[in-house]
Structure formats: C-alpha cells, structure tokens
Image (cartoon, helix red, strand yellow):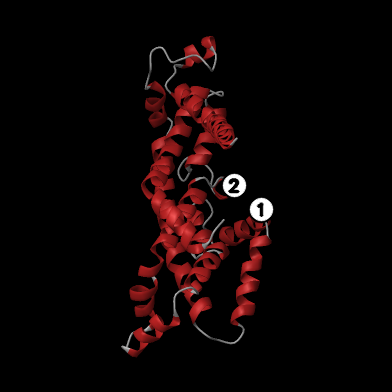
C-alpha cells in the first residue's frame, strides 16, 4: 500500500510538472520557428529548421535597449531596497523609541492597500516634479524600501541575539558598524531571498512603467513585449522570442541561488 501511494504521488508530481513546464517549452520552441512555418504548420509543429531570425529581429525592434533599461532599473531598485530596508528593519527590531511597534504595524498595514490605488497619486507627484517619461520615474517609487521587505528583515533581525549587538557596542562599535559587521553577515540567506524577490517583481513590473513612460526611450521588457503584439500584428514567434529573453535571466538567478533560497526558508520559517 505504501509503494502504491508513493507511485501515485510521483505520477501526480510528474503530471503537475509537465503541465507547469509545457507552456514554457512550447514558447521556447515557437521562438525558434519561422513565422511562415508557424502560420502554416500550427503552434505544435517542431521547428524545421531551427532559426534565430526572431532573436535577430528583436534587435531591430529596439528590444536590446529595453533589456538594458530593465537591467539598470532592477539593479538600482535592488540596491536601494536592500540598503533602506536593512536600516528600517534594524530600527524596528533593535532600536527603542516611543511608538516603535505602533509605527511598524501601521507601516506594514499598507500592504493591504492594492498597488493600483497608488498609481494615480504617484503619477501626479512625479508629473509635478517634471519626471514623467524619465528613467528616475521608473526607479524612485520603489527604491526606498517596501513594507514587505522591512517586515521580512525585521522578523529575522529579531532572532539575532541582543548579546551580540551589546558586545559589539561595548567594543566601541557604532550602529552602522553593528549593522555591517554583525547583522548583515548573520542575514545573508534572507538578504539573498529578498534580492531575488525584488528582482523578479521589478523585472516583471508592467503597470507602472506603462503608465509613467511613453515611447521607446525608457520602455522596459514587459512593455516592449506587449508592444510587439500590436507593432508586428501579433507575430507570435517574435513575441515568444522576446518572452524567452525576458525569462532566461530569472531562471539563471534561481538556479544559481536555489540553495540560499531553501536555506532562507528554513532560517526565517517562511511557508
């Protein structure tokens, strides 16, 4: 009975894996298919022959610039999120000041506000500052930390023994020294996880870049991919090539850091 249960479990897991991965495999194959074959042979036909023409055409469509803008935007946001979130989380976890807990929970409560509610106020603020359709308009709303990041780091920082912090202070360490030499080395797994979460969310961000920018100059990957559908009359082979280019960096990041992600789940108790 145990063997049968194990066999059924593996069959169910295999079936789930196939259902999950099949769309990605189909998209990858479509990206290597010529537009003519896709139109005449159907989406399930094997590419004959394999062609890189769709990827070459992406360069002419300005996709390379969108990739560079997205990479730079994501890098700055990740650096800002980690820097400011670490400072905020340490203050909420280790420093004592009046109203600390109340302020923290009010701040975390903003997680319940849908992001779509803040789009119009953010747009008006940045438009008043003359930053509409600029690179900084893509970065500024997300670079100064986030409630989720501060909540995640604060819960982890609270597990760091106060004795370590007090010992560092007795040795003459400042608050910044404590953060750099005590807190951060003990928090590498959760910092890596937060960085990956931020990369994925910003790499795939669509609504805000669509609202705050116009034209190809500051277009990001998600907006550029959506524009291909109308610009090239729904040429799906080209769209699948763009989608593949957008997905590959995220897959590489996950493969490289998967052990740290698993370790951080154990350390922080995330479900």
Q: Closer to the N terminus: mark 1 or mark 2?
A: 1
Q: What is the quadrant of the N terminus in the image?
A: top right
Q: Is residue 243 left or right of residue 12?
A: left
- Which residue position holds label 2? 207
Q: Position of residue 139 (x, y in %)?
A: 48, 57
Cα separation between marks 1 and 2? 8 Å
Helix, strand or loop for disc 1: helix
User: Farthest left residue?
Assistant: 171
Please tell me which residue is depicted at 48% across the width and 59% down the height of the picture.
Answer: 266
As rendered, which of 70 and 181 lies closer to the eye?
181
Label 1 sits on residue: 116
- Above or below, 35 relative to 187: above
Residue that sits furthest to the top in the current view: 40
Query: Which residue corresponds to the image point at 44% horizontal and 82% vertical from the top-left?
Result: 162
Residue 195 seen by the camera: no
Report x, y in % for residue 120: 66, 56
Label at residue 242: none
Question: Does dot 2 land on a helix, a strand or a loop?
Answer: helix
Quadrant occupied by the C terminus: bottom right
Find residue 247 and report its horizontal and vertical position in percent: 45, 38
Q: Is residue 210 above or below residue 242?
A: below
Q: Does residue 63 lie above or below 253 as drawn?
A: above
Q: Residue at x 45, y 61 (%)?
A: 190
Q: Are marks 1 and 2 in contact (CB under 8 Å)?
A: yes
- Residue 80 lies, in percent from the top left, at 44, 63
Disc 1 residue crowd, few under 14, some 14–19, many 20+, Cα 10 Å: few
């Amino acid at each position: 009975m145990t063997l049968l249960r194990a066999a059924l479990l593996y069959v169910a897991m295999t079936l789930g894996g196939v259902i999950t991965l099949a769309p990605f495999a189909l998209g990858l194959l479509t990206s290597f298919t010529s537009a003519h074959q896709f139109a005449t042979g159907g989406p399930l036909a094997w590419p004959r022959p394999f062609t890189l023409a769709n990827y070459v055409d992406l360069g002419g469509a300005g996709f390379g610039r969108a990739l560079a803008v997205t990479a730079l935007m994501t890098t700055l946001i990740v650096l800002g999120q980690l820097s400011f979130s670490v400072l905020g989380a340490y203050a909420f976890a280790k420093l004592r000041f009046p109203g600390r807990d109340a302020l923290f929970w009010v701040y975390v409560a903003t997680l319940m506000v849908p992001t779509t509610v803040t789009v119009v106020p953010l747009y008006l603020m940045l438009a008043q500052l003359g930053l509409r359709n600029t690179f900084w308009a893509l970065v500024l709303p997300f670079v100064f930390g986030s409630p989720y990041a501060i909540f995640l780091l604060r819960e982890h920082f609270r597990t760091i023994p106060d004795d370590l912090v007090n010992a560092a202070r007795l040795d003459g360490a400042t608050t910044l020294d404590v953060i750099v030499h005590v807190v951060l080395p003990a928090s590498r797994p959760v910092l890596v996880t937060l960085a990956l979460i931020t990369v994925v969310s910003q790499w795939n961000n669509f609504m805000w870049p669509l609202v705050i920018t116009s034209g190809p100059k500051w277009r990001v990957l998600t907006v550029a991919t959506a524009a291909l559908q109308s610009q090239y009359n729904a040429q799906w082979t080209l769209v699948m090539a763009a989608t593949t280019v957008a997905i590959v960096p995220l897959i590489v990041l996950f493969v490289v850091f998967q052990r740290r992600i698993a370790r951080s789940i154990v350390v922080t108790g995330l479900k």
